[in-house]
Amino acid sequence: MTASGGSPKRRYWIGYVVGGVAFALAVVAAILVAVFGFMGMVDRVDELQRVPATEAGAAVTLAEPGGYTIYFEAPGVSEGLADIPSVALQPLDGAAPVTLRDYSSKFNYDFGGHDGQAVATFRLDRPGRYRLRASGAGRSGGAGAELAVGRAIGDGVGRAVARAVAIAGAGLLVGGGIAVWTAIRQFNSAKPPPPR
C-alpha cells in the first residue's frame, strides 16, 4: 500500500520529466540567444559606414573613441575571388595618418547584399572626420567595391556563441543533475530493506 501522494514510481517519473524540461528550456534559450546574436551581427553590418574602394576614397565620421575595424566589400571577396587592397585612414585636418594593424585572423561575411572581409583594425583616440581610401585593389577596384568601417562585427558573434554554449551547458548540468539525483533515489528505494 502506498501513500496518498502517489506511488514512488510516479514520483520518480516526474523527476525525470523535470530534468528533461530544464534541459529543453535551456536549449531553446541558447538557440534564441544565438539567433538574436546573428540578427545583431546583420544589423552591425548594415550600420557600417561605406566609401568607394578607390585611391581618392571618401570621408567618414568616427564619432567615438575606441576600437574599429575596416572591411573590404566586393563580389566574391568572402570566397577568395577578389584581391584585397591596402587601406589608409587620414584625418581631414591634416594630422598624421591613423596607425592601422592587419586583422589578426580571417573574418568574412556574406549577407544582406554585403560580401566582405576584415582587413585592418585601429584604435581611435580623436573622434572626427577621416578620409578612408584604398590602393592596389586590382580585380576588385571596380565601381562595386567598397571599404566599410565600424565597430568589430566578430566580437558580437563570439559573445553570442559563448552565451549560447554557456546556457546550454548550464541546462545540461541542471537537467542531468536532476535526472541523476532521481535515478539514485529510485535505485535506493528499490533495495530490499535490511533484515531485522
Image: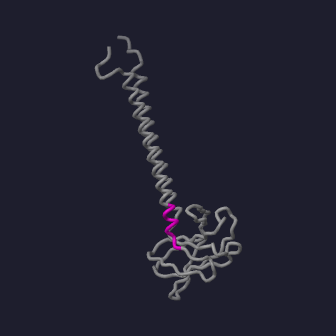
> In the picture, which quadrant includes the N terminus?
top left
- Whole-percent x, y for residue 119 in the image: 61, 70
In this rendered view, identify the residue nearer to me: 66 or 36.
36
User: What residue is drawn where x is 67% and y is 61%?
Assistant: 79
Q: Is 46 covered by the magenta stretch?
A: yes
Q: Is residue 25 above or below residue 117?
A: above
Highlighted magenta segment, given as a residue range: 41-49
> Residue 182: horizontal and vertical position, in percent?
41, 29
Residue at x-position 46% and y-position 52%: 33
- Specify the farthest residue to the bottom: 94
Task: Judge whether 193 appears above or below 111 on screen.
Answer: above
Is 144 or 105 nearer to us in this picture? 144
At a point 62% along the width and 76% down the height, the residue shown is 53
Quadrant that contains the C terminus: top left
Q: Residue at x 52, y 65 (%)?
A: 45
Image coordinates of residue 68 in percent, x first then y, are 51, 71
Find residue 114 and report its horizontal and vertical position in percent.
58, 65
Q: How is the image coloured?
A: one colour
Q: Is residue 6 left or right of residue 82?
A: left
Residue at the far top in the pictured view: 196
| Magenta: main secondary structure | helix
Comparing 102 with 79, the one in front is 79
